Image (cartoon, rainbow, N blue to C red):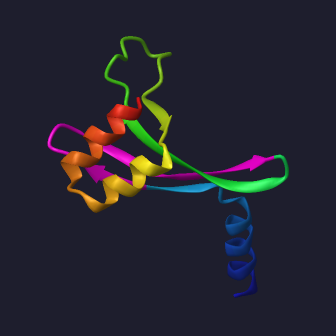
Amino acid sequence: MSNETETKTDWQKRECGALWKKESPSQKYFSGHVKVDDDGEEKLLRVVVFSNRHKSKDNHPDFRIYTVEDNKVERSTKGSSSSEVTETEEVL
């Protein structure tokens, strides 16, 4: 049982963020955060991840990651899911 605890601790040490599945009337996407090092200080960078609608070749990415301004996140979490995507797209 100690191996399970050690493995879990190892995974926790390596965790660098989290994403949640979201859905708007027009698409599915992910919303969450990643940890970044800013001059020795760990900060959470809010991100959204959209499917790459312009993928035409295998070497094109499947998803695109965008940063989100904090004030956009605060407003979007208070509104409906459709307004969330609209406000997020304003940032893009």
Query: What type of secondary structure mainly makes up the magenta span?
Result: strand
Point out residue 18 in the picture as x, y percentages from the top left corner: 52, 57
Question: As displayed, is residue 90 above or below residue 24?
Answer: above
Q: Residue at x 40, y 47 (%)?
A: 72
Residue closest to the eye, 72 or 53: 72
Q: Nearer the viewer, residue 82 or 3?
A: 82
- Would residue 33 be counted in the magenta stretch? yes
Could you tell me residue 74's position as x and y percent?
40, 57
Left or right: 13 as drawn, with respect to 51: right
> Is 31 left or right of 43, judged from the image as shown?
left
Quadrant (top left, top right, bottom left, bottom right) of the N terminus = bottom right
Image coordinates for residue 3, horizontal then vertical, percent: 74, 79
In the image, the segment drawn in magenta is 20-38
Question: From the image, which quarter does the C terminus lie in?
Answer: top left
View extreme (left): residue: 25
Residue 9 vertical placement versus 41 (above, below): below
Name the spot of residue 64 as percent of width and height, x first. Answer: 45, 30
Residue occupying the point 31% across, 22% down: 53
Q: Is residue 20 above or below residue 36?
A: below
The image quadrant of residue 52 is: top left
Residue at 71%, 72% in the rendered image: 7
Count of marks overlaid on the render: 0
User: Residue at 84% of width from left, 46% of height from top?
Assistant: 39
